Amino acid sequence: LAEELIISDSKLKEERYNTLIPQIEALTTGEPNRIANMANVAAALKETFDFFWVGFYLVEDNELVLGPFQGPIACTRIGPGKGVCGAAWSEKKTFLVPNVDEFPGHIACSSDSKSEIVVPGINSTGVVEFVLDVDSDTINDFDKTDQHYLEEVVRKLV
Ligand code: SME
């Protein structure tokens, strides 16, 4: 039964992403303002999944600066290589962190954050322009399904 519940859980998650992606597409298509698009994407993700914190950090003057988000107040600036966000930025890849307490250098903007996923927005010349950070207040809340769909969401914003 436990296994069936897990399967139906991940099916539900996939269905939710499959409903959400076309909505995001419709919201962002034809709108060139990145901040506006990020704001709506953060809201749509928060509404759909009730994530603890979901938002963007934008690369500016060799720092990550807080952008549109939904959730509790967060750190305003993150230096290169710092925390999960900084790691995703410098290594140009998605970081799935099941337990933030086990991630060296994790920045605890909130002690309620337990697991997270950070996806970098990489432009056509290979430069990271922003990162999408999603945090959960439960351990091990993100998996490859989240990675797959959140990477798709980020591609729509670069
Ligand atoms: N936990 C992140 C910092 C950003 S916030 O949690 C909103 C990190 O280590 O990159």
Image: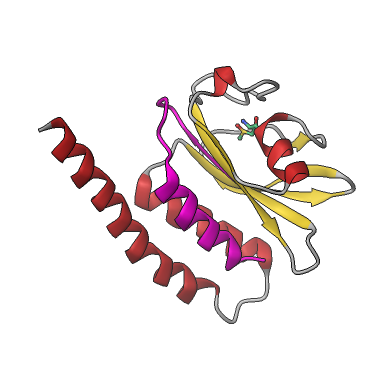
Instruction: Tell me the residue at 49%/49% (across/down).
Output: 147
Q: Which residues are magenta?
A: 133-158
Front-most of residues 44 and 116: 116
Q: In this rendering, would 100 be left or right of 44?
A: right
Q: Quadrant of the C terminus?
A: bottom right
| Residue farthest right in this picture | 61
- The answer to if 107 sits in the magenta stretch is no
Left or right of 71 on screen, residue 38: right
The structure residue drawn at horizontal position 70% and vertical position 29%, both measured from the top left corner, is 83
Is residue 75 visible from the viewing direction of this image? Answer: yes
Residue 43 in sight from this viewpoint = no
> Which residue does the image show at 28% across and 59% down from the upper left?
15
Which residue sits furthest bottom?
Answer: 30
Tell me if residue 148 is in the magenta stretch.
yes
| Residue 31 image offset from top left, x and y in percent | 61, 77
The quarter of the picture where the N terminus appears is: top left
Of residues 69 and 99, which is closer to you in this image?
Answer: 99
Looking at the image, residue 101 lies above or below residue 11: above
Q: Residue 98, how many percent across, how many down?
A: 48, 29
- Residue 97 placement, left or right of 129: left
Query: Vertically, is 113 above or below 122?
Result: above
Q: Residue at x 32, y 55 (%)?
A: 14
Quadrant of res 2: top left
How far across and how far down the image is residue 89, in percent? 74, 45
Q: Residue furthest left?
A: 1
Residue 105's image quarter? top right
- Determine the quadrant in which ligand 1 lies: top right
Picture coordinates of residue 49 (x, y %)? 36, 47
Q: How many marks?
A: 0
Color style of the picture: secondary structure
